[in-house]
Image: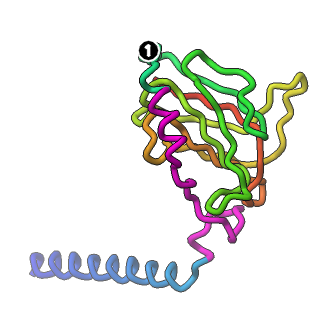
Amino acid sequence: MATFLKRKATVVALAALSLTLAGGGIAAAANPAAKAEAGQPSARQPGHQPPVTATESRAAKAALNATLAAPAPGLVAWAVVSANGTLLQHSANVVSAKKFSPSVPGQFAGQYQVTLDYDVRLKSLHATIGTNDAANVPPGGEVSVAPRYLTPNAVFIQTRSSSGGYADRPFHLVIAN
């Protein structure tokens, strides 16, 4: 009799767990707003990178071939880039910075590329909104960073306003080796 009750209790517990999980999944699917992060705007633009042009590809390959040497493990490469894409300050391995033009199809405001002279695909990439002026009070906003599509020695940065719309913002970039 005791074995029967243990089995019955186990079956009841598993059934209750299954129904709870299924009900939660149904509730989440029925309420798409529940999927959005709390406090984040609901209408965000998709994250995508502009296509790589032949000119960009050649320039990146030239920079990769002219490499000094990647920083040793534990050291970093860094850059400070203005809202218009100008490279303001940087470490020795940073070759260039570029702002994509929102007037070109497939490119939007706040999209940047920073090129280095070594492969950064397996490195740790960090960015934050920031300036290098004396007051150092940057505008509000968000920043995302990722390896540049089809370009092993470049980093793609996307900046946004605080409401989530594409916006040009100055940023600091760190690549940890």
Q: Nearer the viewer, residue 53 or 176?
A: 53
Which quarter of the figure has residue 56? Answer: top right
Q: Which residue lies furthest to the right in this view?
A: 135
Which quarter shows the C terminus? top left
Q: Inspect the image, locate mark 1, and give the three-letter code of the amino acid beneath it.
A: Ala
Q: Where is residue 100 in the image (x, y as percent from the top left)?
A: 67, 48
Residue 44 vertical position relative to residue 108 in the rendered view, above or below: below
Q: Position of residue 77 (x, y in %)?
A: 56, 22
Element assignment for label 1: loop
Which quarter shows the N terminus? bottom left
Is 88 situated left or right of 66 in this image?
A: right
The answer to whether residue 158 is magenta is: no
Q: How is the image coloured?
A: rainbow
Q: Position of residue 14 (x, y in %)?
A: 26, 77
Which quarter of the figure has residue 169? Answer: top right
Q: Which of 175 and 74 is in front in this view?
A: 175
Query: How many numbered tags mark residues here?
Result: 1
Q: Nearer the viewer, residue 3 or 135?
A: 135
Which quarter of the figure has residue 4? Answer: bottom left
Magenta-colored span = 33-62
Q: Position of residue 160 (x, y in %)?
A: 72, 52
Q: Name the residue under label 1.
A: 69
Residue 30 vertical position relative to residue 123 in the rendered view, above or below: below
Residue 18 vertical position relative to residue 115 in the rendered view, above or below: below
Is 138 situated left or right of 50 in this image?
A: right
Q: Residue at x 28, y 82 (%)?
A: 15
Q: Which residue is drawn at 51% across and 36% down?
A: 154
The answer to whether residue 57 is magenta is: yes
Circle 1 Cα neighbour tier, 10 Å, few/some/many (<14 / 14–19 / ≥20): few
Residue 1 vertical position relative to residue 44 in the rendered view, above or below: below
- Which secondary structure is most common in the magenta stretch? loop
Q: Which residue is drawn at 57% across and 82% down?
A: 31
